[in-house]
Image (spheres, rainbow, N blue to C red):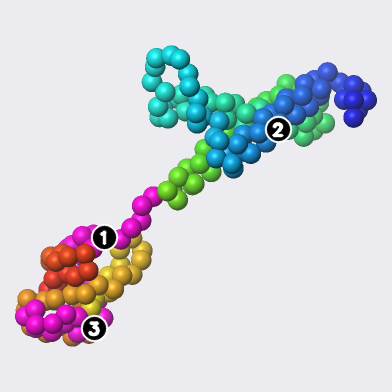
Amino acid sequence: MLDFYNSLPLDLKIFWAIAGVASLIFVIQMIMTLIGMDVQDGLDADFDGDVSADGPSQFFSLRNLTNFFLGFGWGGICFYNTFESKTLTVIFASITGIVFVLMFFFLVKMILKLNKDNTFHTRETLHKTADVYLAIPASKSGKGKIQISIRGAVHEIDALTAGEKIATGSKVRVVEVIDNQMVLVEKI
């Protein structure tokens, strides 16, 4: 292995060294993340300043630097024999590094979407239209059921009406949320 490395030209040695070190750091970061010891957790720094995760400071982090050098090193190795000009090789390796950082941002953004609270709350149905699933008896004398679509999911909710009976299949509007499992509706 050492003979292989020593036989390489200097610029290719640099790409291999960057790719090797960045790959090692990347693997360590991934293992620490998977076992719950993220690199940024538990860091006790002794300085004053705003270290929030918003703004440009988020772009310049150890993880992003590692991702850039990972793409830069492996991109340089892959493009080394593609271009005669070593300047073009460095440019395309840099573009590959930037693409790696952007892919990481995209993946984190998609993962953070999974963290959203998509819990359905009956109050979200207020002033929305729905279909009557089970007929609703007149003047709050009994309950029926409606089907309503909220955020792309159909929910079945108990319903009352203050007016006359509403038949199955009718369109209604939710006018009041009575509790977490019942609404008051009117025919449209």
- Image coordinates for residue 99, horizontal then vertical, percent: 60, 35
Residue marked by disc 2: 23
The amino acid sitting under disc 2 is: Ser
Q: Residue at 81% of width from left, 22% of height from top?
A: 13
Residue marked by disc 3: 134
Side (left or right) of 168 relative to 14: left
Which secondary structure, mark 3? strand
- Image coordinates for residue 121, horizontal then vertical, percent: 26, 60
The amino acid sitting under disc 3 is: Leu
The local crowd at label 3, few if under 14, some if 14 to 19, many if 20 or more residues have their Cα within 10 Å, is some
Q: The magenta stretch spans which residues?
A: 116-144
Measured along the vertical axis of the image, is residue 62 above or below residue 100?
Answer: above
Q: Residue at 51% of width from left, 41% of height from top?
A: 108
Residue marked by disc 1: 121
Q: Residue at 23% of width from left, 78% of height from top?
A: 145
Q: Earlier in the sequence, mark 1 or mark 2?
A: 2
Is residue 141 covered in magenta? yes
Which secondary structure, mark 1? loop
Marks 1 and 3 sit apart, C-alpha to C-alpha, by 21 Å
